[in-house]
Image (cartoon, helix red, strand yellow):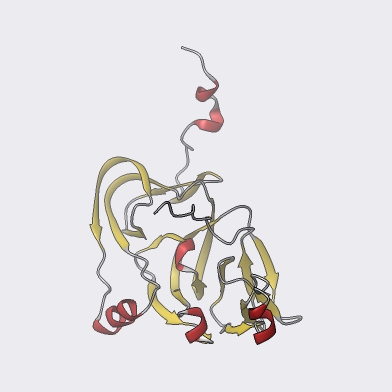
Amino acid sequence: MRSDLFAQDHQEQQTTERWVLQSKRMLRVSLGDDVLSAKGAMVAYQGSVTFNHESSGGLGKLMRRALTSEDTPLMRVAGRGEVFFARESASVFLVALEGDGISINGRSLLAFDATLEWDVHRTKGVGVMTGGLFNTLVQGQGTVALTSDGEPMLLDCSQQPTFVDPQAAVCWSANLTPDVVSSMNVGSMLRGGSGEAIQYSFSGPGFVVVQPSEGPILPPHTH
């Protein structure tokens, strides 16, 4: 049998590394220690592996998740073998935390070492207008896998104020505390607005990662 499918680029990467990008859009994790991932992110696995719902890990965290829209349901992946993760053909990139942390838009969180600490935080700003904006803070020693709808771009926020569409923000330095600002005024609302009414505002030493997309476009309702 012959096919381009059997080319080296399509075959499983042979390496002893625990976290490996099988391709730009697929992640392979070799199990030993447990992994937490977004529910539904597993696309294949080899070996003896179990998948279980991950609880919030405490009453305070449970209440914050219940009261916010940042409900990123997680599952615990355990056992022996290799697990492959992906999300809607989005680009995947890895971040190695070395005792520090990163704030992540929940839609971009793919998987991370279960030994890392995580919690949900609310973004300050015009909450009434936005309906609330929240992010997941992950910190400690370990690896985090994130997705970007297209090739991501990193912006340095230390030189000048930086503004990012909330749907396009993938993650940012844990030391940065973004505000939510609005460029909307009465006249703009009466004229239909610009479609760019609300942004995250970042300022200070640190970075923000931006994807070239504002998320999937929902099809129009047929009812």
Relative side of 1 to 76, left or right: right
Q: Position of residue 86 (x, y in %)?
A: 44, 48
The x and y percentages for residue 42 are 36, 48
Q: In this view, does 5 lie above or below 71?
A: above
Residue occupying image coordinates x 59% and y 65%:
168
Q: In this view, does 154 lie to the left or right of 31?
A: right
Position in image of residue 135 (x %, y %): 46, 75
Q: Which residue lies furthest to the top in this view?
A: 1
State the residue at coordinates (50%, 75%).
101
Task: Determine the residue positioned at 63% across, 53% down.
Answer: 151
Give the residue at x 46% y 12%: 1
Task: Please provide percent x and percent y for residue 104.
Answer: 49, 70
Residue 117 quadrant: bottom left
Q: Where's the C terminus, which quadrant? A: bottom left
Report the front residue among 3 and 125.
Answer: 125
Q: How many marks?
A: 0
Where on the picture, by quarter, is residue 72? bottom left
- Give the vertical position of 44 relative to 172 (above or below): above
